[in-house]
Amino acid sequence: MRDRIKLILSACLLPLGLAAQTGTITGRLLAPDGPLPYASVVVKGAGQGAFSDEQGRFAVRQVPAGEQLLAISVVGFQRIERRVMVADGQELALGDITMERTAADLDEVVVTGTMKEVSRSESPVSVEVITPALFRKNPGPVLFDAVGMVNGVRSQLNCSVCSTGDIHINGMEGPYTLVMIDGMPIVSALSTVYGLSGIPISMIERVEVMKGPGSSLYGSEAMGGIINVITKDPVLAPSASADVMGTTWGELNADVGVRLGREKVNDLLGVNVFNYGSPRDGNNDGFTDVTLQQRISVFNKLALRRPERRVASMAARYVHEDRWGGQMDWTPAFAGGDSIYGETIRTDRWEAIGQYQLPLPGTVMLQVSANGHRQRSWYGRTPYNADQYVYFGQFYWSKRLGARHDVLTGLAYRSTLYDDNTPATAEFDSDGQFVRTKPSERPLPGLFVQDEWSITELHKLLLGYRLDHDKDHGLVHSPRVAYKWAPSGRWAVRANFGTGFRVVNLFTEDHAALTGARTVVIAEALKPERSLNGSINVVRKWPGAKAFFGLDGTIFYTWFTNQIVPDYATDADLIIYDNLHGHAVSRGASLNAEARIGQPLRLLAGATWMQVFKEDRGVRADLWFAPRWSGTFTASCTFRKSWTVDLTGQVYGPMRLPVQPNDYRPEYSPTYALLNVQVKRAIGDRWEIYGGVKNLLDFIPQDPLMRPFDPFDKTAQDPVSNPEGYTFDTAYIYAPIQGVRGFLGVRWTLL
């Protein structure tokens, strides 16, 4: 009996003993000019890892005892792999590790260009990357603002009252930009601006931006470009982090991240809270300058450790937001009335993402996502209530065949369900009487194939093709060709030719115009919107021991056809959707430059010149909100290894604006700049204090509202007081109305 008890106790205590066979690896990473933050330190095969902090220090905990292979990698530096011996219950202190710069700076791993992890310098498709380190040079509460730091990408506000907007790439309108999270299109159509608001920065590893069509891999909406938000691996995330910031305008933003779980299950929880509740009218037009907002977003990502580091993860996010803007004395009691004007939007949104790599030869991946978006809003006295659900599934296989071919092929299915309270999703009888609700349902199955052919060590060719089927458009073909020539690590030339298409959810466009009992008519043989793009990209780098200089230049040309536009004028009882009788063009050139001079100074700058116009029935006109030229820059200088000064900014040239007949406001905006300065101080290993000034030049657009004193147009028809027939309008907005303001924040990180 006693022996049996000993045996049972031994069996019970054995897992505890095994679990205790772990140790910790610590160290500090250094560059030639100081500490090296945000480096990835991974124990290969064990699934444990960490990131270095602002001072370059890292700590990888619960590493299995015994000999392990430690891999260290970071942007622009040569990868290090080192075998180490970990003792049970002890700390292995590696001390200072100095990393050498690579000839190819910014050598991040990217996935957007080819749907596979590949070094950015090796990718045949040009992809730009934003990292949290760049976010923090101009801290803000939403990712919507951060992507504007990429040259050629612009965060465009579409309404000066409700502050909604979208993302423009190379001057093309927001619906032509596909926004993804972890490679899945869960942010689209109705929810684009709300999907980018409230993603906790603590959850983001990087943001990849690909300019030009990408429908050969990603299908509908990838006509003008792709923004792919890559979330962190819970295994590598800090144990805890917090970032709290406030501004002199009364804005408060808090971003908190916590890593939970160990061993086979790792969990990362992120929470973002934003509040702005102090109405302000600096331009004295009687309306709020900035929409008042209350938002909470909760993001949770779960990762499982599997043999051979196969992927298995699940993520979910919930966002709730209330926002309103309008006349200063508006309250919710006035919603829907015609005495005091206001626009109020209540949003509830959920998202779910799952990825699972099957244990089969090659890389066999199953990806699924779903999201629901519920919007309840008032625009003055007009209600707009909408619900949208997007379901997505994708199965792809990737494998290297022989020494030269890397093949990827897969199947995808996307279904969009949309319903609102407008006549566009309702059915009426011959007398114009409402019969029933008729929500829009749009399934979109597709298949794709891609071959990345390494012709020689210097030449690489990428061939891609996708075939989708839409119920209105039939089969839609999307081919792509990309070529890369890299004679050395200092030179790279890329040529890309591709197509994009967009199957429009007709009823999410122009909903504000649907004010009567109109019947929707879709013209016969309606064609999907298409784009054809060609670009040439040249990268040249001059690396050195104490300095680095690099140039990245691109010439691009994109031709858009078959734009689907609504016709409200032909028949007052009809909305007729038909293709544009003409085309649109986005063409131009961009140049990015990077320099590191000496030890403390780093400069990033970019400029884009472009012509973006539409030609309909022989009449040419510039597209709205497409600046003829623009530029971005970042200058950072570090003093005494703990003080850093960051100067960031965007500069925009003239852009065409939507004006009314005989409008007294100019049709083209002036040249303007948005400049920001920040000073930050690192305190020890865990704390950082930062503060600065946004919109340093205090620039705000003039006359963003037409007739703000009569927002319901009660006297608009009076020929005496309004001889030009102007009407209230909120679309003349080309820059934020928020003037100069200070900000102060604190960050805390526990590795």
Image (tube, helix red, strand yellow):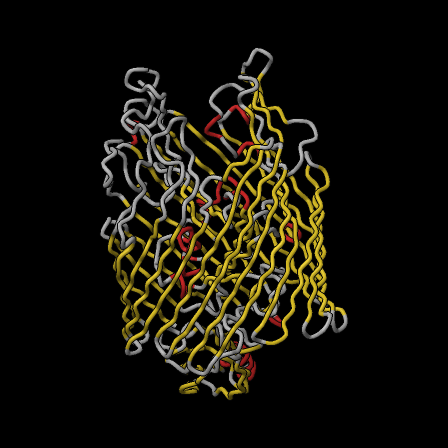
Quarter containing the N terminus: bottom right
Image location of residue 631, percent across then percent down: 42, 56
Please tell me which residue lies in front, 420 or 380: 380
536 relative position to 508: left or right: right
Q: Quadrant of residue 424?
A: top right
Residue 9 in view: no
Residue at screen point 50% across, 67% down: 551
Relative to 698, is 518 on the left or the right?
right
Quarter of the rendering occupied by the C terminus: bottom left
Left or right: 551 as drawn, with respect to 705: right
Q: Nearer the viewer, residue 551 or 304?
A: 551
Image location (x, y in percent) of residue 674: 33, 53
Above or below, comparing residue 386 to residue 272 in the picture: above
Rendered position, 641 above or below 310: below
* x and y percentages locating residue 104 in the rendered image: 53, 74
Name the foreground residue: 742 vs 333: 742
- Asked if residue 286 lies left or right of residue 541, the reply is left
Residue 127 appears in the figure: yes
Q: Residue at x 41, y 26 (%)?
A: 661
